[in-house]
Amino acid sequence: MKDFYDEHYSSNLMTLCLHSNQEIDDMEAMAKDLFKNIPNKNIKAKTYGHPLQPCYGGDVCPKMTKICPVSSTQEMKITWYMPYLGYEIRKVHYDYFHELFGHEGQNSILSYLRDNNLGMGVTIKRNEVIKQMTMFEMVIDLTDKGLENVP
């Protein structure tokens, strides 16, 4: 743990986001006071290969993993890993995926799932796993029939 701390823990690699109804000057003063002791070691962020290079080899993806849940959740997650392309382009990609897979109107994935009693909801998520790739995830809330039809 100490080695990880020494190698990765530095204020130049961190981001802080505050949300409050307080005045911005008060929030800034509070944040500076609370986080002033985090050292800046000027550590260079790790890179994990070329950003357009697949993050996993062909023997790993595509892959289906089945998990036996401890609760009664019935969902299927489909995950895509894409290169990290910066904020503006990343937002465009997310908006595209969200509209493509999260649309709830006629002829949508959700309407097909509902019409065929396979699923009741679709959620689209995005996560910056590391600054070299973005994870897009589609979560489908399955019905009993939908769960029976998962390969």
Image (cartoon, rainbow, N blue to C red):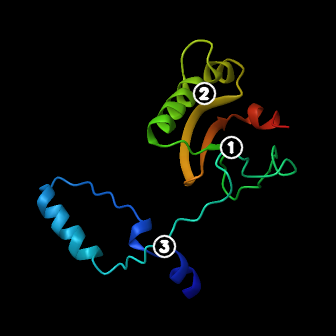
Looking at the rendered structure, the kind of residue marked 2 is Phe
Front in this rendered view, residue 73 or 136: 136
Q: Secondary structure at mark 2?
A: helix
Front in this rendered view, residue 10 or 72: 10
Q: Secondary structure at mark 1?
A: loop
Q: Specify which label sits upstream in the sequence, 3 or 2.
A: 3
Q: What residue lies at 81% left-to-right and 43% top-to-bottom? A: 62
Mark 3 or mark 2: which is in front? 3
Vertically, is 91 above or below 84?
above
* Quarter of image, res 125: top right
Residue wearing tag 3: 43
**Farthest-out residue, bottom:** 2
Q: What residue lies at 65% left-to-right and 36% top-to-bottom? A: 140
Q: What residue lies at 53% left-to-right and 65% top-to-bottom? A: 45
Residue wearing tag 2: 101
Q: Specify which label sits upstream in the sequence, 2 or 1.
A: 1
**Farthest-out residue, top:** 106
Mark 2 or mark 1: which is in front? 2
Vertically, is 90 above or below 20?
above
Left or right of residue 111, residue 99 in this image? left
